[in-house]
Image (cartoon, helix red, strand yellow):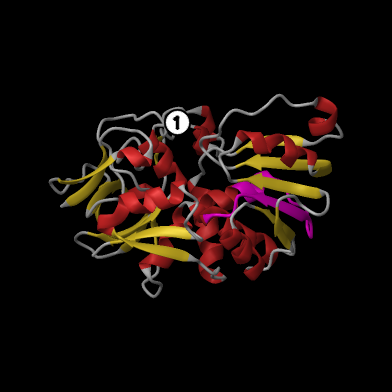
Amino acid sequence: MRAWVVAEPGPMATRPLELVERDVPEPGPGEVLVRVEACGVCRTDLHLAEGDLPPRRPRTTPGHQAVGRVEGTNERVGVAWLRSTCGKCRYCLRGMENLCPHSAYTGWDADGGYAGYLVAPRDYVYPLPEDVPAERLAPLLCAGIIGYRALLRCDLPPGGRLGIYGFGASAHLTAQAAIAQGAVVHAVTRSAASRALALELGAASAGDIPPEPLDSAILFAPVGTLVPPALEALDRGGTLAIAGIHLTDVPVLDYERHLFQERTLRSVTANTRADGRAYLELALAHPPRVTTTLYPFEEADRALTDLANDQVSGAAVLVMS
């Protein structure tokens, strides 16, 4: 099979990805072999390729939003970021498996979906419907699920005012979920295309700063310098959730300007399978508009380069040819 690997982490201009031929992997006990139909391209994949996330193994195949079919049964499934947990630690036992110190991740600890096939533990794949195109399902598996958890973590009150910083794959799905719940959404993004998309999807504004105090905010852009202004834009008692796995350094905070009046700053760490099931049930019952930019499988490096340069509208998706 063909597979992309991270040969030498570095800026996309250095071409860190390499397209190679590999043997089709063999599933172990409790695992399934999945033939990939499409795989979403996530900013986490970019962090891995460029070295912001230290590689956990050499020449790993990225990709953790894979839609495919189980060999032998033809069952359609999704393979997402969370690959396994121990099931025994105190975090797993209290329903916080996303914090399991022994957790493993698709496309980081094990080869992911930028390939013809991948293997995954049966207990960690999600059943998917037959009647939805693979390229529309793929972004739900990370962009949707992580956005859903971030929405829970930011404590958005009913009818509240939500600020979304950065408006890419996850943000455009999260905004729709919040608007459907009655929230007023303000998008903060530099991209003209992303501003236009935010307004098309029902955002009340899209610009450089929110036009009113916010009850809640989610930071999707991996830019630490946005943390102080995002906190300052919160109303009293507001909460900012940082959704990414990687963030550049956060500047010094001023307690009175940024945190006083019971403003809260939270991180978002991966997701639980319960998050995944809840979000997919919601998204399949009330399908969001999934805006995608499609790339042939052979152009995964171009997809990541476009993502690095903020040239992707919505979600980038690799489609197997």
* Horizontal relation, residue 40 to residue 284: left or right: left
Residue 108 picture quarter: top left
> Magenta span has 158?
yes
Which quadrant of the rendered structure holds the C terminus? bottom left
Residue 154 picture quarter: top right
For residue 125, say whether it is visible: no
Q: What is the tally of numbered marks visible in this picture?
A: 1
Q: Is residue 150 above or below residue 136?
A: above
Of all residues shown, which one is farthest toward the top? 252
The residue to which callout 1 is attached is 88
Residue 65 picture location, percent across and down: 39, 53
For residue 233, say whether it is visible: yes
Residue 312 picture location, percent across and down: 47, 57
Point 29% across, 30% down: residue: 57
User: Which element type, helix, strand or loop, lies under badge 1?
Assistant: loop
Magenta segment: 150-168
Q: Nearer the viewer, residue 109 or 20?
A: 20
> Magenta span has 240?
no
Residue 227 picture location, percent across and down: 68, 36
* Horizontal relation, residue 44 to residue 27: left or right: right
Q: Amino acid at mark 1?
A: Lys
* Horizontal relation, residue 23 to residue 83: left or right: left
Point 71% across, 47% down: residue: 217
Residue 136 picture quarter: bottom left
Q: Is residue 252 above or below residue 320?
A: above
Q: Nearer the viewer, residue 193 or 227?
A: 193
Q: Nearer the viewer, residue 131 or 179?
A: 179
Point 50% across, 61% down: residue: 313
